[in-house]
Amino acid sequence: MRISANPLRGQQFPAVLLLVAAGLGLLLANLPTHDPIAAALDVHLAVPGTTLDLSLAHWVSDGLLAVFFFVVAIELRHELTHGELDSPRKALQPAIAATGGVLVPIAIYLLIAGDGATASGWPIPTATDIAFALGVLAMFGRGLPSSVRVFLLALAILDDIIGIVFIAVLFARDVQWVLLGAAAVGVLLFWLLSRRLGARGHFAIAATMIALGVVCWGLVAASGIHATIAGVLLGLVMAPTPASRSRHALEPAVNGAILPLFAFVAAFVVIPAVSPNELSPAFWGIVVALPVGKIIGIGVFGWLAMRIRPRGTEPTLHLPDLLAAGSLGGIGFTVSLLLANLAFADDAGIRDQAILGVLVGSLLSLVVAGFTVSWRARHHRRLAAAS
């Protein structure tokens, strides 16, 4: 396997960087540094001549994170057309497992926090952070069959699709259809221009596309749809060859700057000085739903999915491998943090506890995943040595 010379293109280092950034944000939020950093993050920057007036924290979560979703959308389109999900046969088993990995965490969350103001947080524990999960798999999974990574990749991609739908549908507010229509025209022009890249006037076309992308982002943000959806739409429609080049060019910036910065800002919350029984049900719902819900949902539904195979053939994965994949699936992190911010945007107290729930639940999943993946990796190495 070829190893990239740039660690920001790998799987392990970006995962560690994300964890460090989140830990630093949480630490500084609970030290005397809280007030000056909070004041800086609350500074508003407006775009002259528009209605866009966002705090620095929102420029990170709504602006920079749109670049991350642009890269994610390019990966999604590739996997749906030429990768692990390019046929119904390939997609069926991970789709069933992903369904369990969404439904069971939702059920657990609603069981714990389904009453009153916390009920709207049910989408939070449904996400899987693909970068984090693959990073943990790379660190602890030496010797695992490639089918585990392929299954996890397909599962996380489907989770991303579900998360994007949740962001677009559940958290739209007072949608301005004229602005959204103008954004759709911009996306269409972006699609047309992307097919002209490589022809004469390449640099002018590229510059026009960048400007058009920014305009589309602004229109989507002003329309009432979360601004990151603009990145998704632009990534999905871009012509394959320039899209692949754009993803390659943006990957170090996304892994090395955008995601750590978002993790820092999202994790910059004050730990409440209360006893455990005074914590919000949202906190406990997420803490339980991420590790337990994902393991049960992906493990059980994945086991059922493996029954769907040609007669007389062995299942691709066995239950212990599926449980290891489920523990990795509980690392929600990036998208779960965004969903926590959106679900409780109007209640800062619950929002901060939900964010803490994401961090604690993801950390628990990470620890469990380290043990289960290492265990399964040793098992497969023993099998390989004995054969």
Image (tube, rainbow, N blue to C red):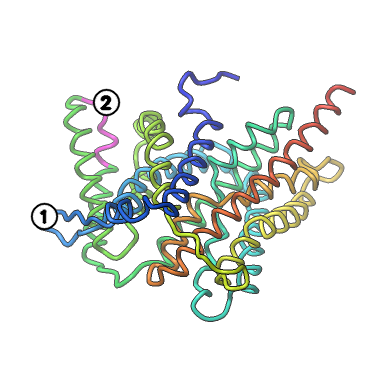
**Is residue 350 depicted above or below 369 in this figure?**
below
What is the total number of numbered labels drawn onto the structure image? Answer: 2
User: Residue beneath label 2, please?
Assistant: 198
Q: Is residue 333 left or right of residue 250?
A: right
Q: Can you tell which mark lies on residue 369? A: none
From the viewer's side, name the closer residue of 30 and 296.
Answer: 30
Q: 10 Å neighbourhood of mark 2: few (<14), some, or many (≥20)?
A: few
Q: Pointer 2 and pointer 1: residues touching (CB < 8 Å)?
A: no
Relative to 266, is 74 above or below? above
Q: Position of residue 14 (x, y in %)?
A: 49, 34
**Which is more N-terminal, label 1 or label 2?**
1
Indicate the amino acid at tag 1: Pro
- Tell me the kind of residue under disc 2: Gly
- For image coordinates 50% across by 60% down, the residue present is 271
Q: Is residue 48 magenta?
A: no
C-alpha separation, residue under disc 2 versus residue under disc 1? 34 Å
| Residue depicted at x 16% and y 31% | 204
Picture residue at 72% right of the left edge, 39% below the top: 373
Which residue corresponds to mark 1? 48
Tell me which segment is drawn in magenta.
192-199
Label 2 element class:
loop
Q: Is residue 363 left or right of residue 71?
A: right
